Image (cartoon, grey):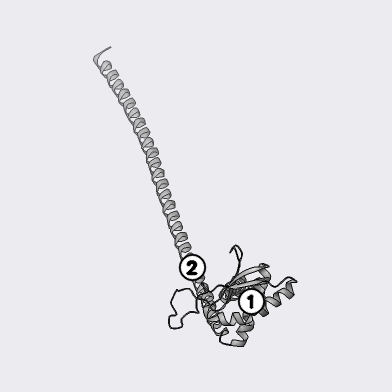
Amino acid sequence: MNDADVSKQIQQMVRFIRQEAEEKANEISISAEEEFNIERLQLLETAKRKLRQDYDRKLKQVDIRKRIDYSTQLNASRIKYLQAQDDVVTSMKDSAAKDLLRVSNDKNAYKKLLKALIVESLLRLKEPSVLLRCREMDKKVVESIIEDAKKQYADKAKVASPKITIDEKVFLPPPPNPKLPDSHDPHCSGGVVLASQDGKIVCENTLDARLDVAFRQKLPQIRTRLVGAPETSRA
């Protein structure tokens, strides 16, 4: 083999090696690009997922804040509404309490009322001996009707006439002072309190106590009238 043939073979080998190197380099480049694209897509998907999670979290926070704000406003409205209702009910009760003060102004009517209250209290207690308390200003009126009340009770209950002792040491409070409307001192608009001699059974039959009972019993109806009838009950 002459030098020309050797040179030719060497050139062929060089071209072959170079071609293989280029093909290998090309394969490496393509593989690296594919891996880069895959990694880039993965990073992109991760970033997108994080953005979606952040968005969902913030959206949920906004929704929660809206619900909290709505609930707070609703509760505040309910409290104002209930307070307004209570104010109206209190005003009605205060007005009725003022009317009670005028009951004792009619002497004859109040005298009959006191006797009826004493008889009613005796019928509730059904005790042979009771202690009676009244306002100091009503003491003379009570003394004037007590015998009639005892007789009326005895006739109704078919029992012997009871012994009634008027408490002259402790009286019910006087009526409220109109000049001190905001005073919280104890007061009584009229009526009586009867108790068994041992004090274990008490019948509070004052006008104020009866007003409290009446309001407690009628309060649901009063609130219903304030609110208005439900739609389903309207024809």
Mark 2 surroundings within 10 Å by alpha-carbon count, few (fewer than 14), some (14 through 19), many (20 or more): few
Residue 139 x/y as whole percent: 56, 79
Q: Is 170 on the left-hand or right-hand side of 13?
A: right
Give above or below for 48 relative to 186: above
Q: Position of residue 153 (x, y in %)?
A: 70, 74
Q: Earlier in the sequence, mark 1 or mark 2?
A: 2
Residue 68 vertical position relative to residue 175 in the rendered view, above or below: above
Location of mark 2 (residue) = 79
Question: Where, by quadrant of the figure, is residue 147 drawn?
Answer: bottom right
Which marked residue is nearer to the observer: mark 1 or mark 2?
A: 1
Which residue does the image show at 62% across and 71% down from the upper left? 217
- Residue at point 60% right, 72% down? 165
Quadrant of the frame with the C terminus? bottom right
x and y, in percent, of residue 9 in the image? 29, 18
- In front here: 207 or 150? 150
Occupied quadrant, residue 198: bottom right
Closest to the observer: 213 or 32?
213
Measured in 3D between alpha carbons, the distance from the residue under mark 1 to the one under mark 2, in whole angstroms, is: 40 Å
Task: Name which residue type carries label 1.
Answer: Leu
Provide the secondary structure element on which disc 1 rests.
Answer: helix
- Identify residue for label 1: 117
Residue at the (27%, 16%) spot, across then down = 6
Q: Is residue 192 visible?
A: yes
Q: Amino acid at mark 2?
A: Ile
**30 left or right of 171?**
left
